[in-house]
Image (tube, grey):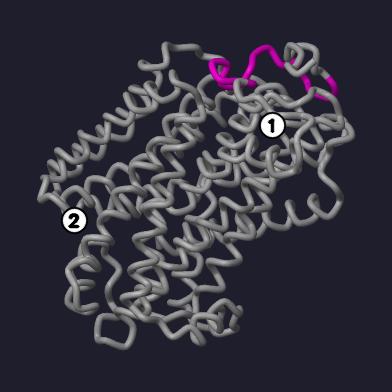
Amino acid sequence: MDSQPPPAERGRGWTRAATSLSLPEVHGSIAVPHDAGFWRKLFAFAGPGYLVAVGYMDPGNWATDLAGGARYGYTLLSVILISNLMAILLQALAVRLGIGSGRDLAQACRDSYSRPVTIVLWILCEIAIAACDLAEVIGAAIALNLLFGLPLIWGVSLTALDVLIVLFLQHKGFRYVESLVIALIVAIAACFAVELFLAKPDMGDVLVGFIPRGEILANPDMLYIALGILGATVMPHNLYLHSSIVQTRRYLDTQAGKTEAIKFASIDSSVALMSALFINAAILIMSAAAFHGSGNEAVADIGDAYKLLSPLLGTTAAGVLFAVALLCSGQNATLTGTLAGQIVMEGFVNIRLRPWLRRLITRLVAIIPAIITVALYGEEGTGALLILSQVILSLQLSFAVFPLVSFTSNRAKMGELVAPRWMQVLGWSVAVIIAALNVWLLYTTVF
């Protein structure tokens, strides 16, 4: 039998038995050809990883990548690489939790912790999603302003349309949502491929940049930007999102079937996150080639980068492609943010609202602060708001990472699908490192 049994049948070591499916309208909606070969099965599982990958290339990461390249050339490429490897590990654990337990991360928290703890975790997660949405909304609005001269306040308001897009595509089938996201990622990658061709970076220096260097720790200013890259890379809502959307596949509900599903879903997310590595590295490489050593080392603002790229690279296409990539990045991330909002609301407290109302609430929580800030303080206020959103994300991250690593390391909860020992050791190490780095980043930001 291909379909999974009711979640109530999966009790095991959880405090409470599961009582609902994650994303019920699309749960198990995509068939997996069980008797097919490797490549057909891989294609069936391909998709969720790309929805997750957009969170690692959202507008919130652009400022740190631009600043790192402009100030320090290619040196911080190693930080982007290490951040991406951490992300691959954590998303693989999210896959394991979703498939192995039949729960997304929000449901797992609800079924393990007391009601007060669950409520606190839910509120913290909703704040983090709103903060992340804020960065994406502002990023998309800045791109519309750069490309079409549209006032920021109108650009922010237009981002609400993504609610209608997600509803329409999800009604057609979850594959349509995945296809749109992948198309936007391809557009972003194409824009930066052209940017790199125009910037003509020194490939020898680029390769050396991926090797970690001690000067990153020795230079306080460089360390601060490195911490910013690490702290803003892993988005907490991606862990909730991924553990849910892997369950859109209709895999066999046996240990062998789930083990195979974990393997293919992990390959999907790892390959997808390599696209995020390419795009984040491309932003830093382009910034290093265009600004470092040209007297523009202080560039960190997205608008300034847009204005300077065309004259420095000798063609107006450079600035236009940069803004197009920013628009695609912002819109892509808001699409997945609406899904994450649904998952945490249903998973933590089992609140069931009509899809259009649920997503409209999620979007308004991000749009209203952005509109107020733009109206009162203009473009300068949006920069401060972006910084605040990243600090809020840093505060919330550990509240998602530690439960994830704890659940997937618990044999009573995961049974034979518990994470292998090496993943547990790496998972706990990454959790502690991210917590320490984010505490330090928060301290240096505030003081």
> What is the span of residues highlighted in magenta in the rendered image?
12-28
Residue 241 percent location from the top left of the image? 55, 35
Task: Please report the residue visible at 38 percent of the width from the left and 55 percent of the height from the top.
Answer: 188
Q: Residue at x 46, y 44 (%)?
A: 182
Viewport quadrant of the C terminus: bottom left
The quarter of the rendered structure image containing the N terminus is top right
Where residue 380 is drawn, which disc sits there?
2
Which class describes the residues within 10 Å of circle 2: few (<14), some (14-19), or many (20+)?
Answer: few
- The circle drawn on residue 276 is none
Q: Which residue is mark 1?
A: 98
Q: Is residue 48 visible?
A: yes
Amino acid of disc 2: Glu
Give the residue drawn at x 27%, y 86%. 294
Q: CA distance from mark 1 to mark 2?
A: 41 Å
Q: Is residue 262 magenta?
A: no
Please tell me which residue is depicted at 86% across the width and 32% down the height of the picture.
256
Camera-side residue of 303 and 179: 179
Image-quadrant location for residue 259? top right
Q: Is residue 379 above or below residue 1?
A: below
Magenta-span inclusion, residue 14: yes
Q: Is residue 407 visible?
A: no
Q: Amino acid at mark 1?
A: Gly
